[in-house]
Image (cartoon, grey):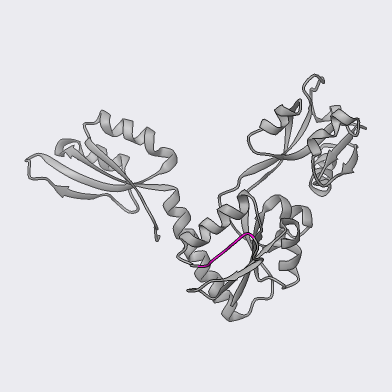
Amino acid sequence: MLRLAIQKSGRLSEDSLALIRECGISFVSSSYKLKTEATNFPLEILFLRDDDIPGYVQDGVADLGIVGQNVLVEAGFPGLEVEALGFSKCRLSLAVPRADAYASVEALQGKNIATSYPNILGRYLAEQGVRANLHTISGSVEIAPSIGLAEAICDIVSSGSTLLGNGLREVETVFRSEAVLIAQPHLTPGQTDLLEQLRFRMQAVRRARRSKYILLNAPLSALEEVRRLLPGIKSPTVTPLAEPGWVSVQSVVQEDEFWHITSQLKAVGAEGILVLPIEKMIA
């Protein structure tokens, strides 16, 4: 049995649970239960405060955890990271009041900065040769400049709308973060095997999320150009059509390259382009 700790609420929790379910692991969760057990995989899920997860995994209370890199690094346990998971991406940024002049990070020399991440911010400022007074607060960091607590803040940013709503502007990116899978350092051989099984499933799901299955018809005369545009996993599947001089081509494309490749395919004569989602993709 593996014990996996995830955040008990919020976007990271929702994304983590979605990933586990896409791995084919079934379980029942509810807002009032703090743990649940999978019905078809030896996994128990613990719902905890995100700040507590790195320490619980380090101490072996939980075997695994899904947590933001920002929380992991701030807690001082970056060595627990097993794999980046590609979701819940955000950044830890410095922000100042919109009306304030700002040329570079040197403008914060001797200033007061409010943050929930004093360790990450402290290291960043030291690297920049800036000495500032850090005020550690646990929430509502954005309000600090307007109440006179600090001249700047350092907090997690996704869209930036919260900063704008509080009269602030983002000026420096201190740290980039995403969800990561972490593991305690003393797993048994059996637990290590289960971890690898879980990672195998997660990687298949993530690969599928980043990819699309594409089918198209193309003139035989353009086949070499189509094959160049669609390498696939090894090479595209090509099938002759009933109409002479035409073939059907099937392949896989990366999501972020899809529109660019599609326009090139049309330019060389491809027709009837059909795009389908992929549920799982085993390399």
Return the residue nearer the eye: 192 or 100: 100
Q: Is residue 41 visible?
A: yes
Q: Position of residue 270 (x, y in %)?
A: 22, 35
Q: Which quadrant of the structure image shows residue 282?
A: bottom left
Q: Determine whether, in the image, residue 94 is placed left or right of residue 30.
A: right
Magenta-drawn segment: 27-31
Q: Position of residue 81 (x, y in %)?
A: 65, 60
Q: Which of the image's four quarters has the C terminus?
A: bottom left
Q: Which quadrant of the structure image shows residue 133?
A: top right
- On screen, 194 above or below 84? below
- On screen, 42 above or below 107? below
Q: State the residue at coordinates (67%, 66%).
A: 34
Is residue 29 part of the magenta span, yes or no?
yes
Q: How many marks?
A: 0
What secondary structure is the stretch in magenta mostly built from? loop
Q: Which of the image's four quarters has the N terminus?
A: bottom right
Is residue 1 part of the magenta span, yes or no?
no
Return the residue nearer the eye: 97 or 86: 97
Q: Determine whether, in the image, residue 130 is placed left or right of residue 63.
A: right
Q: Position of residue 161 (x, y in %)?
A: 66, 31
Q: Position of residue 280 (x, y in %)?
A: 40, 58
Q: Is residue 151 visible?
A: no
Q: Determine whether, in the image, residue 217 is placed left or right of residue 114.
A: left
Q: State the residue at coordinates (48%, 67%).
A: 25
